[in-house]
Amino acid sequence: MLRLIPLLAVLCCGVWPSWASAKQPDIILVMADDIGIEGLGCYGGVSYRTPNLDRMAAAGVRFTHAYSQPLCTPTRVELMTGKDNHRNWTYFGILDPRERTFGHAMTDAGYATGIFGKWQLQSYDPPDLPGAEARRGKGMHPKDAGFDEYALFHALHTEDKGSRYANPTMLEGRRGSDGTLKTYRGRYGEDVWVEKIMAFMDTKTDKPKFVYYPMALPHWPFVPTPHSADWDPDKPQQEHLRYGSDMIEYMDTTMGTLLQGLRQRNLARETIVIFYSDNGTHLKVTSKMKDGRSIPGGKAMPTQTGIHVPLIVHCPDRYKPAVVDGIVEASDFYPTLLELAGAEKQPGKHLDGISFVPQLVGQPTPRRDAAFFWYDPRPGWDKEKFSRHVFALNKTHKLFRDGRLFRIGELPLKETLVQQDDDKDRAARTQLQAVIDQAMAGTNEPPLVDAYGKRLDK
């Protein structure tokens, strides 16, 4: 059955894309876990072999100014709800169960929906962490997240999560069901998830398909992959920083396997595949760029190395190869998916994002002039060293709410604290302060707390 995009929805979007009369596209959104732009060859990285992502970028649309929050849960919550974090933040590792995700929205748009990969949004804190009893089990269970099928690492309590890599453990189930924990002996997590994605794509239905694939790679612990010389899932997995390179490269291998699976099904040209990352590379990983610089990872920090991430969109039947420089942030994915599905924004649902579909089809507007960040991953385990950062950036400057202003250099990932303003600095400060003020206006900012949930603002 042809899945026609409603004419009214297209007109409401203000865009008339070349595919307006085509069926609703199948969509796979992939989010890697801890990789900045320096990790990919197509962004100038030279430390790792990433041929599959490089080919995907060459044949697709590569964004040069895509941003995430500095750490995973803040990005995941913003991505899935389309809201900036100060509107719906509760705790680290928690998605408020009252929220509406893009899984719900894509279901309403007529899609069969599946999620495969890492969850970590239902119960994060270990039981012995001070204050944990107030937070454990308070997040959204995947059965309620709007997906018809799920197979997810760390979907329940932290102590029950098992491995995400060798001999992976996953909670598997369907919409509304509590699911069953299953361990895949002798297997590797990403391989199992790609198989499940392909099985989902093989499901006979007259609905279009939406898959959200929050990858585990290349997140710590740094352990062997199936391509490592000492890979052996029957032995305890040795952790060492040297496996970081193997894991980044296996991230690329996994994308190659996914794209090959689509090619084998004659789906590669018409399926929209989106590759993104939840934050920058791990702090202990240093990568080289082709311009000769060594880039330390910036995960968890509000620096360019913590937030400047890859974004590649691949669909040869719809989008011509291009490199685009529009700013994209995590909240933009929700309205983008709605537009791709031919659906309207839900009335009364606050969405902070701006669809980046116009950039995919070569239209100049609408697009954002700046990105806004409200970042404070507390409370939660291992969050003692964190503090709150509220800031905004455009292509030339970054302004923090406390008044610090940085110039963003022409070289990717470079930024310099402004010691003495010139006219351009003052203009940027005025613009970015207005962005911060507008984002924060009329909101009840979450209370300032420490890592254990104790109020600091009283």
Image (cartoon, grey):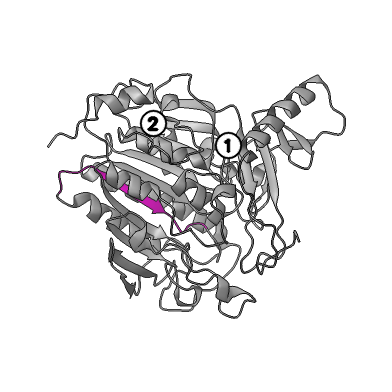
Residue 273 left/right relative to 174: right
Question: Could you tell me residue 429's position as x and y percent?
Answer: 75, 29
* Residue 27 vs residue 46, the one in the foreground: 27
Question: Could you tell me residue 410's position as x and y percent?
Answer: 68, 28
Where does the C terminus fall, quadrant-wise?
Answer: bottom right
Give the residue drawn at x 38%, y 21%: 14
Magenta range: 205-218
**Above or below, 101 relative to 433:** below
**Above or below, 177 relative to 335:** below
Q: Amino acid at mark 1?
A: Gly
Crowd band around label 1 with a 10 angstrom C-alpha radius: few (<14), some (14–19), many (20+):
some
Which image quadrant is residue 140 in? Answer: bottom left
Residue extending farthest to the right is 420
**Above or below, 312 relative to 186:** above
* Residue 239 vs residue 397, the one in the foreground: 397
Which image quadrant is residue 432 in? Answer: top right
Residue 45 left/right relative to 156: right
Label 1: which secondary element: loop
Crowd band around label 2 with a 10 angstrom C-alpha radius: few (<14), some (14–19), many (20+):
some
How much space separates mark 1 and mark 2, taking CA atoms? Answer: 17 Å
Label 2: which secondary element: loop
**Above or below, 377 relative to 416:** below
Q: Which residue position holds label 2? A: 59
Give the number of callouts: 2
Question: Could you tell me residue 143's position as x and y percent?
Answer: 33, 62
- In the rendered image, residue 39 lying in the magenta stretch gets the answer no
Give the residue drawn at x 66%, y 69%: 452
Which mark identifies residue 288?
Answer: none
Q: Amino acid at mark 2?
A: Ala
Q: Which residue position holds label 1? A: 44
Question: Could you tell me residue 418's position as x and y percent?
Answer: 82, 33
